Amino acid sequence: MNIEDYRDYCLLKPGVTEETPFDDDTLVFKVGGKIFALTSISQYGSVNLKCDPERAVQLREEFDYVLPGYHMNKKHWNTVVIGSGVSNAQLREWTDHSYDLVRASLPRGVREELAKDC
């Protein structure tokens, strides 16, 4: 999956916005103003995704292309290395998990608004 396909996949989700808040190269995807995925625009070599802490450890132990979140809280974030064995299906599944975790943490009113978009 290239960066355009990944971007399109993220933007299909209800309430998702994209920004470059850190610099011109770091593309950030948010739901309800909270980050659920980020990647480099110029060097699409990895994606940082939020993850349930227990699952994060499990994925790191099972897959050598899943690492502790680069520049993120290692307990809650994984870095998935693109082009190193991760399948498109895995990347979509883990992105969905990240989105769902962040969405579930939003205030009820925001979640209800997002549910209207489904």
Image (cartoon, rainbow, N blue to C red):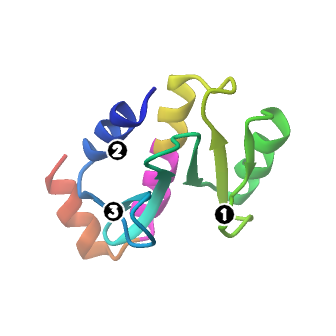
Magenta-colored span: 96-105
Helix, strand or loop for disc 2: helix
* Residue beneath the point at 57% across and 29% down: 90
Amino acid type, residue under disc 3 in the picture: Val
Nearer-the-camera pick, 8 or 101: 8
The stretch drawn in magenta includes residue 103 = yes
Q: Check contact, mark 1 vs mark 3: CB within 8 A.
A: no
Magenta span: chief secondary structure: helix
Q: At 22% across and 59% down in the image, what residue appears? A: 114
Count neighbours of disc 1 (C-alpha within 10 A) and say few if under 14, some if 14 to 19, many if 20 or more.
some
Q: Badge 3 is on which residue?
A: 31
The amino acid pointed to by label 1 is His
In screen coordinates, is 62 left or right of 36?
A: right
On the image, numbered disc 2 is attached to which residue? 10
Q: Residue 65 at x, y = what percent?
A: 73, 36
Q: Pointer 1: what residue?
A: 76
Q: For mark 1, give the secondary structure.
A: loop
The residue positioned 71% from the left and 48% from the top of the image is 55
Mark 3 vs mark 2, CA separation in Å? 10 Å
* Mark with earlier residue (3, 2): 2
